[in-house]
């Protein structure tokens, strides 16, 4: 058994311990150096194993519970989960079981459980992918499932869960020429303009990445700037800009962008992204609530629960419990009020969140329209190629869900509204 496989699995188990035990997001763990000591290939394997295990956690636990009389410590449970997902997704039993035994054996506190791990995983391997496939699609935790069932109904939530379980393809936004990007990388050119790839490999080694001809951006996340439709040389205030996917779209369209974000580290990523793509914007590290002046065109991509991105971030339902969402919802309404105050008469503002919760989308805009009598929702701006008019909501926003475009590989959950001042 290759030592590299053991390293990657050990790191995957560590990531799961952090997410489930400490409530940390994978992105935070990785940014703080959790995978730093691994070679690039091991790092990719560790991340893939952690993501696959989080997506399949409910099934893995159901497979394992038959063979466990009581729950072992979290690290051992996570080693069992990683191995179960690998086995049930076709991994070779001998290598997977031996690696899991090595991972557990390498830790003094868990070494005594090597025998248990070996015995349980051999039974899981015998049950195999058939038993796995017969289990239901993993469900969201109750704290998130309940409000979504209230909003969309149980059948839709099951479809959303299917999309979460399937994961997400890789969507790219072209700096200028989407046709050329499609010809160079293949995949599918979506009606909305994104190029969608199924199996990409390492992003930074793909043709055109170093030259800055494109960037990674979910097809749904690329829509708010299309709704705003900035013109060449138009001045745009972009509130909450980092890591800069929308900043690059605005700048590529020729807009003069003032991009504001309060997080210095995240703003560094905007700077790097602009440098790679050779695009320009004025970058401001600061609080959106302290912006002043009057603008014709504003984009507000407010901080939110990010529950629309679970296909890519299956750690979110495990790391969070919804307790901080109330604060975010309050911040969103304050930011929306402030941004509307910064809007000149006749100006337009696009408000968006990558959330599935109506409290962060439909309800925010409905309430803002009630508070600001001079503001109207512009429904025409939402009618973009690839967008079903049935997705336009009562108050005049656009609700996007992971179960939409199911035959094409889905999209992130998003809410977008275009508000104009009389
Ligand atoms: C949804 S993300 C923005 C994503 C970004 N627009 C993009 O497309 O890449 C929300 C951002 O809001 C920022 N943020 C949170 N509170 C803020 C505040 N009070 N002022 C400015 N930015 C804030 C966060 O740092 C985070 O980068």
Image (cartoon, helix red, strand yellow):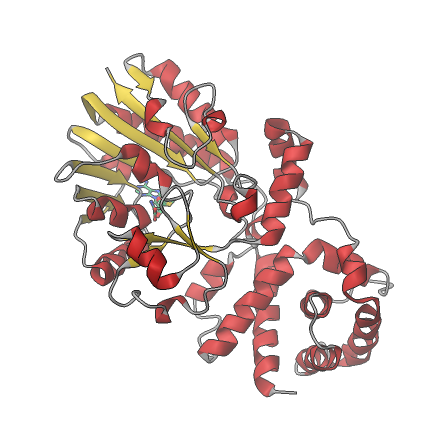
x and y, in percent, of residue 157 in the image? 64, 37
Q: Nearer the viewer, residue 347 or 327?
A: 347
Relative to 4, 133 lies left or right: right
Instruction: Give how far across and how far down residue 287 sits, in percent.
Output: 27, 41
Residue pushed farthest left?
Answer: 233
Quadrant in which the C terminus is drawn? top left
Point 51% across, 40% down: residue: 324
x and y, in percent, of residue 301 in the image: 35, 39
Left or right for 368, reference 50? left
Taking the spot 60% from the left edge, 75% from the top edge, the residue there is 10
Count of number-bearing discs: 0
Q: Is residue 309 above or below residue 75?
A: above
- 216 versus 284 height, above or below: below
Residue 75 in sight from this viewpoint: no
Q: State the image coordinates of residue 407 (x, y, percent, origin top left).
A: 56, 45
- Quadrant position of the N terminus in the picture: bottom right
Q: Is residue 30 above or below residue 322?
A: below
Q: Residue 343 versus residue 187: which sits nearer the camera? A: 187
Question: Ligand 1 lies in which image quarter?
Answer: top left
Q: Is residue 138 left or right of residue 258?
A: right
């Amino acid at each position: 058994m290759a030592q590299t496989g053991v390293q990657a699995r050990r790191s995957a188990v560590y990531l799961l311990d952090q997410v489930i035990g400490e409530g940390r997001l994978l992105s935070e763990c990785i940014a703080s150096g959790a995978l730093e000591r691994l070679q690039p290939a091991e790092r990719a394997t560790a991340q893939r194993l952690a993501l696959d295990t989080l997506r399949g956690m409910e099934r893995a636990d159901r497979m394992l519970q038959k063979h466990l009389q009581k729950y072992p410590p979290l690290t051992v449970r996570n080693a069992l989960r990683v191995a179960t997902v690998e086995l049930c997704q076709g991994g070779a039993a001998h290598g997977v079981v031996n690696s899991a035994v090595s991972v557990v054996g390498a830790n003094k506190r868990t070494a005594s459980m090597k025998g248990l791990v070996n015995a349980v995983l051999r039974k899981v391997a015998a049950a195999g992918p058939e038993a796995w496939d017969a289990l239901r699609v993993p469900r969201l935790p109750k704290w998130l499932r309940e409000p979504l069932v209230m909003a969309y109904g149980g059948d839709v939530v099951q479809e959303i869960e299917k999309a979460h379980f399937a994961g997400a393809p890789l969507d790219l936004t072209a700096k200028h020429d989407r046709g050329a990007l499609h010809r160079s990388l293949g995949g599918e050119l979506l009606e909305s303009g994104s190029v969608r790839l199924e199996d990409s490999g390492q992003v930074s080694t793909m043709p055109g990445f170093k030259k800055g001809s494109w960037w990674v951006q979910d097809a749904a996340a690329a829509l708010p700037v299309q709704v705003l439709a900035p013109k060449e040389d138009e001045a745009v205030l972009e509130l909450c800009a980092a890591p800069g996917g929308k900043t690059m779209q605005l700048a590529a369209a020729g807009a003069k962008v003032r991009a504001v974000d309060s997080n210095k580290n995240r703003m560094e990523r905007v700077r790097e992204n602009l440098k790679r793509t050779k695009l320009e914007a004025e970058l401001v590290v600061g609080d959106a609530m302290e912006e002043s002046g009057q603008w014709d065109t504003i984009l507000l991509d407010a901080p939110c629960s990010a529950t629309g991105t679970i296909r890519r971030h299956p750690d979110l339902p495990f790391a969070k419990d919804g307790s901080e969402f109330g604060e975010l919802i309050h911040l969103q309404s304050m930011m929306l009020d402030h941004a509307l105050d910064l809007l000149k008469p006749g100006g337009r503002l696009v408000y968006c969140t990558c959330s599935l919760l109506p409290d962060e989308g439909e309800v925010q805009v409905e309430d803002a329209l009630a508070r600001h009598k001079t503001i109207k929702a512009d429904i025409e701006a939402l009618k973009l190629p690839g967008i079903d008019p049935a997705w336009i909501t009562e108050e005049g926003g656009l609700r996007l869900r992971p179960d939409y475009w199911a035959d094409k590989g889905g999209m992130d959950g998003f809410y977008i509204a275009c508000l104009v001042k009389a």
